[in-house]
Image: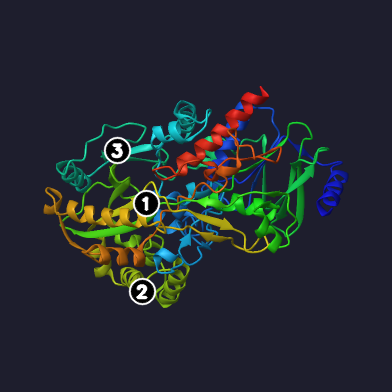
Amino acid sequence: LFMTILSETMIENKTNIIMYDYIIVGAGSSGCALTARLINLCPDAKIALIESGDEYLSPLSRPPTEQGSLPNDEFSTSERFPETWNHPKANRGYRTVPQKALNNRQIAITRADAIGGCSVVNALIWTRGFREDWDECMPDGFKGKDIESEFEWLEERIKPVRYETNFLGEKAIQAAESLGYKKTKYSLWESPGTSNGTRIAIDGDGRRQDVYRALGANDSRITLLKGSAEKIIFDYSSEGTPYASGVLLKMGNGSSKELFIQDKGGEVILSCGAIDSPKLLQLSGVGPKHLLEDLDIPLVLDSPVGEGLKDHPLVVMSFEASKLPEKRSPNAINASLYDESLDIQFQFIDGNCNTSFIPLSLIEPCREKKATNIIEKLKNAAALSGMTVLAFILSTLAATVPPFRAKLQTSFGVLLSVMKPTSTGSVMIRSKDPTDAPLIDTGILSDERDMNTMIKAVQKMKELVKTSPLKEVVGAELTPSAEGSDEVKELIRKTASVYHHSTGTCSSCLDDKLRFRGIDRLRVADASSLLFHPRVPTNASSMAVGARCASIIASSTG
């Protein structure tokens, strides 16, 4: 009854308002790709793009100060990406519930609150991933040949730059090959074995690529609306089938605004990411029935929205290096190794981005802070990041003691990750208040198979650094060391985190065209839509999903 009254009220209020063909919720990475591709293919479409976050990469958003510096320069300067990862301006500040496999630690989950989404704060890695994953796991229309055309369209505009490895990475590759790993040839698609470079999303000036503009989501035909989507507005067909008819926004000044789609052919498309798309759906009455009933939210559809969350578990190891390379990539990642037998990845990094990776977001910003304030800021950051005592001590020393910081910089680091995790988690709202952060349970390493794989990854890395020619330039381990399997497991429980590559939370609810099953005129197109967990960083994949969604819509309307 409540929804019927609400729907009738909405219909009465549709007079004298703008009706859109498409309302896209979220101007993050996938939302920008979706919007830009859609206006490219459907130039006459009337599109509204909703985003709650601000803009940090446009020159207009960074007016020079009296001293001539740019207040948001950390976002566009690629070498300064460690400062942006949990930047208070552009991060939603989410944290997990206590993670059972990680000694009940709570982990910071970075979700960007910015135009351009996580492409504004991430480590700039651009990778298509493994083509066979798309072929084997995705439906027709999303196979490798289909998604490749979207990657090509994106890359014509993003223009990712490839950086080849330096001598540290080269020695790591040579050591890996002496242990039997195969050397791979450079390809736009990933393959198992060693890789002597990485592609990075930077522009011709070496600055972080502005995805919003590079793709064309800033097209004047698109209406950008700054506000937070609080719920999807639903109506019902004569047969009783719910359909999306609009979105309720909370504007920056605190007022509410209702947006509606055309009665014929209009669609609402969510592109908020694997955390916030399920959150908005649940707030709107689409989700597990028991959850919505407990929170007194009128049920639109009983659905497993929010279940199936996956992420890559992450462990960082760091070692002394006898000399630093003269050449380094902007994000310090210079080479990688993919072990197909275990589906684990080793990312080799050097310089000021390795041991200070614990956590990555903390060290670099602290260098610029005033000494009178630094301890308090570090304590706050430690609380937000769910850091261990050891990480807090390392971070404090690195931020305040130059000789200690120099020691950490003269190092060789490795990011270890299980790339095909079996552990799953969930995203569930905690209340009907849209401003409340959701309950995020990554379930990271909760499946014993993932924990055993991570233990083997640590052991393999210890073997690698003792193998020539890497052992000639790499010395003692700087991060805490453990030898036996039980000791390594306990160390993982104390120090592991996530790679912030969340996927899958809406995938079981969608058809092969990303339409929401059981609800008309509603799609979801972002990392939550993926039926598989990419074995690579997920930013490019989520953008390809957004672009592919636009191509599917265009083909059906043409």
What amino acid is at disc 3?
A: Pro
Vertical arrangement, residue 95 with respect to residue 374, above or below: above
| Residue occupying the point 50% across, 47% down | 503
- C-alpha separation, residue under disc 3 versus residue under disc 2: 36 Å
Pick the residue in front: 59 or 323.
323
What amino acid is at disc 2?
A: Val
Q: Residues within 10 Å of mark 2 (few under 14, many from 20)?
A: few
Q: Nearer the viewer, mark 2 or mark 1?
A: 2
Residue under numbered circle 2 = 389
Vertical arrangement, residue 532 with respect to residue 44, above or below: below
Q: Which mark is residue 79?
A: 1
Q: Which mark is residue 330?
A: none
Q: Position of residue 526 (x, y in %)?
A: 55, 42
Q: Quadrant where the C terminus lies?
A: top right
Vertical arrangement, residue 140 with respect to residue 358, above or below: above
Q: Position of residue 508 (x, y in %)?
A: 57, 43
Q: Position of residue 220 (x, y in %)?
A: 65, 36
